[in-house]
Image (cartoon, rainbow, N blue to C red):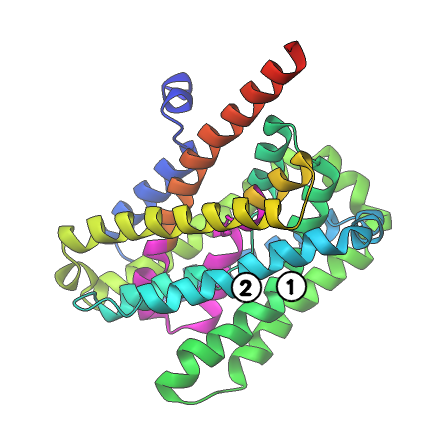
Amino acid sequence: MNRLLSRLNIDPYILLLISTVALASVLPARGVFAQIAGGVADAGIALLFFLHGAKLSREAVMDGARAWKLHLSVASLTFVLFPLIGLAVSRIPGLDPALATGVLFLTLLPSTVQSSIAFTAIAGGNVAAAVCSASFSNLAGIFLTPLLTAVLITGKQGGFSTDPVVTIAVQLLLPFLAGHFLRPWIGGFVTRNKKVLGLVDRGSILLVVYTAFGAAVIEGLWSRVTIGELALIAGLSLGVLALVLLAATALGRWLGFSREDRIVLIFCGSKKSLATGVPLAGVLFAQAQVGAIILPLMFFHQIQLMVCAVLARRFAAAQEREAEA
């Protein structure tokens, strides 16, 4: 099964996400169980960001600061170009308002870390710069994504509230900073147990998805969203990704980046983080809205993995041909 999924460029985790959505659609959490599941999900999110803070090396931060031009270019794609495209796409007539909000929200998220670095390594890019750029993007996303969400989404729906800011500070930022400052003592443990702690990351996201979709199903999500709209979301995700990939390629050439740095710009600048997006959605939106809002993100996540896997292999093949020549 793993070989088949690998050939099809399908992340097995996506199958777990789909199964979780199916379970939440059939057996959504209700009553006391919903409260317990929500509390456990909140604790899992705090632990997730604590581990992210423990993984971030201060040496990587210092080394990465030198390549400011590359990192600024990645940030421009992630937090400027993406949101502009998201604003245009979210205004397509006939799209369910919650799904339109979800499309816009996914464009406000930071880049991924693991997949950006992995694809950069496969393609023969500047791995050290990818580590720094992706880490900076995620760190900036803790502040910029809620700010952009308040300006472009929640601020227009009902005025700005300080409640999400307090929640983010307590549930996300403080655990992240605590993990980072404790890195000298727990960094080795986190590195040695990367696979086990990865289960904590993914398990907490699955729990958030279950509680969010369960609440959305109870509010009538599947009676509002049609198969045609889901197909439209997939098509829009592919279109948005294609635009950003073309822009990243053109920007890298215009700025005169080396081949290795252009690869970093392409892969770090075109990604959106599911691991960061799901917890932030749970904090920034009402629970009944979260299920529909993260649906476009789940589509985009799988599409970006499949497309970038193909691109990384082509970059690697081109590099091999150049070396042989």
Alpha carbon distance from label 1 to label 2: 10 Å
The residue to which callout 1 is attached is: 140
| Place of residue 260 in the rendered image (x, y in percent of width and height, measured from the top left) | 68, 35
Q: Nearer the viewer, residue 143 or 130?
A: 130
87 with respect to 173 (left or right): left
> Split into 4 quadrants, where in the image is the C terminus?
top right
312 with respect to 14 (left or right): right
* Residue 186 appears in the figure: yes
Which residue lies at the image location 54% right of the left edge and 86% below the top edge?
Answer: 162
Q: Amino acid at mark 1?
A: Ala
Please say whether residue 271 is one of the residues in the magenta stretch: yes
Q: Is residue 266 above or below residue 277?
A: above
Count all numbered tags in the image, as a single digit.
2
Crowdedness of circle 1 by 10 Å Cα count: few (<14), some, many (20+)? some
SS at circle 1: helix
Dot 1 or dot 2, earlier in sequence:
2
SS at circle 2: helix
Please say whether residue 180 is one of the residues in the magenta stretch: no
Crowdedness of circle 2 by 10 Å Cα count: few (<14), some, many (20+)? many
Q: Residue furthest bottom?
A: 159
Which residue lies at the image location 38% right of the left edge and 39% below the top edge?
Answer: 14
| Place of residue 301 in the rendered image (x, y in percent of width and height, measured from the top left) | 42, 46
Which residue lies at the image location 75% right of the left edge and 62% below the top edge?
Answer: 178
The residue to which callout 2 is attached is: 79
Task: State the image quarter where residue 210 is shown.
Answer: bottom left
Q: Amino acid at mark 2?
A: Phe
Q: Is residue 323 above or below residue 10?
A: above
* Residue 29 appears in the figure: no
Q: Which residues are magenta?
A: 267-296
